[in-house]
Image: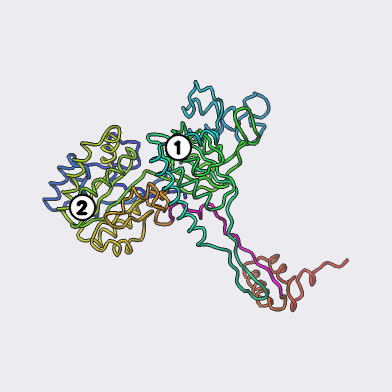
Amino acid sequence: MKYCLFLFIQSILLSNFATSSLGFSLQQLESSSSSSSSSQQNNYKMAAEKYLTPITADQVKLEIKDPVDPTALIQAKAIVKELTSDDSGDGDGKYAGGGINPSALMMVAKKLGDIPKEDSYNSYIVTKGECKAAFEKLNETERKSLENIYARVKTFADAQRKSVTDMEIDIPGGKAGHTVSPCSAAGCYAPGGRYPLPSSVIMTAVTAKAAGCSTVVLASPHPAPITLAAAYIAGADLFLRVGGAQAIATMAYGIEKDNDQGPAIPRCDTIVGPGNKWVTAAKSIVQGYCGIDMLAGPSEVLVICDDTANAEVVAADLIAQAEHDVVARAILLTDSQTTLEAIEVAVGDQLACLPEPNKSTATEAFKLSFAVLCKDIPECITISDDIAPEHLEIQTRDAMEVGKKCSNYGGLFVGEHAAEVLGDYGAGPNHTLPTGGTGRYTGGLSVFNFLRIRTWMRIDDQKASQEMVDDSIIMARLEGLEGHARAAEARSTTVEPAYKKNAPSK
């Protein structure tokens, strides 16, 4: 996945978001549509006072954006180079042990704050014993909640795994089929920044285990006790207490041997999980060498609602998304002016009593958020499909029917009570979802990210296969591939291979 779609309203970003991939120019919005009604123009003049910037349907524009931040990519490349370099000063500069230099990893991890510089525990690994101890220190309510989330995610992932099986069919003269098998080692990343995300530990590691991966490597910087507890219940085999590009590089290239800083780390066949711009940049570097789930952009929610929607509930869901990050986006599509106004008021009321730092984060995110008053629900669906949001909530009459008409999204949440946060915390489906419009062509994280569908064929009856052999000879020569044609002729019972006809005399 090389590019992501990002919503882009007009062409000038807010000055305080000059480096963001998304922004709005309220002055442009105010003057961009000469055909707008006077009431719409008044709304634009008041936009600075609103949390959800009001725009019209034709002002929702799409622009292809590279999800990889150029500066972060340069920095990630420098980190990877440092991690794979020899610190002895001898040789060609490449680490002689192969893979990642563990000493360099510790140095980078401490320099970037993954591991406290004063930490006497000089290792890049958190032991299974530490994870178990963290789990056991949780109170009964916390342990039960973690166990419940684990069970629901595992049940869903197990059902996904069972939905695809080995198969075979008859072909002329034999059989053909496919086998379904997991990759050996999976790398799972869980953010450790603004908020610890133990839910991401469960969503990634449990899914990899359900797929059948024999080794699951988890990475998260300066992990909180709840993150360690989640790693224990999820069954992670190795826990790297590093983050960013250094974590992705370590999971991709591995550490060849046990060493003074920790054990060997296997090269992971695929790496999954959400992360910051350095994580995304590093994924773009290692993809191809190993598999990745996606190159993720800012998180987003889109709510389609009508006059039956509960304004307070919708507002709560928008705020829940906005508090993720200052570049998160909350989008509202409705055919009801009354509902739109009620939600705007409810957002303001609920933000006012949100604690810090959540309040400040959400307030900044709302500068990148917007609302569209549509003529009807079908127009809401059309706009939503263009956006292809990460999370799509439907809060309308006949919500399931509306949801069925939507084509592009990461995860669908139907009805007032199907809160997106329930998906975040383990209703069952995975919460690692495609962002920035990539829901047009891909889905969220699942067991399928860790599975390989491998095909096979065999011929038991040479005579019965001859029509297939003849077709291959003809097609090969139509493509100009004479060697292919002669390889097929070597299996023919009716045609003498050309290499025998044209063989030079001895």
Residue 458 colored in magenta in the image: yes
The color scheme shown is rainbow
- Element class at badge 2: loop
The residue shown at (72%, 67%) is 487
Tell me if 208 is positioned left or right of 456 in this view.
left
Q: Residue furthest top?
A: 118
Tell me if 300 is positioned left or right of 210 in this view.
left
Residue 227 image label: 1
Tell me if 412 is positioned left or right of 201 in this view.
left
- Residue 297 visible in this rendered orientation of the protein: yes
Q: Position of residue 333 (x, y in %)?
A: 24, 54
The residue shown at (62%, 67%) is 479
Report the mark closest to the observer, 1 or 2.
1
- Amino acid carrying label 1: it is Thr
Magenta segment, which residues?
442-460
Tell me if 405 is positioned left or right of 254 in this view.
left
Residue 310 image label: 2
Residue 335 image label: none
Who is closer to the viewer here, 442 or 190?
A: 190
Q: Position of residue 37 (x, y in %)?
A: 13, 53
Q: Position of residue 94 (x, y in %)?
A: 64, 32
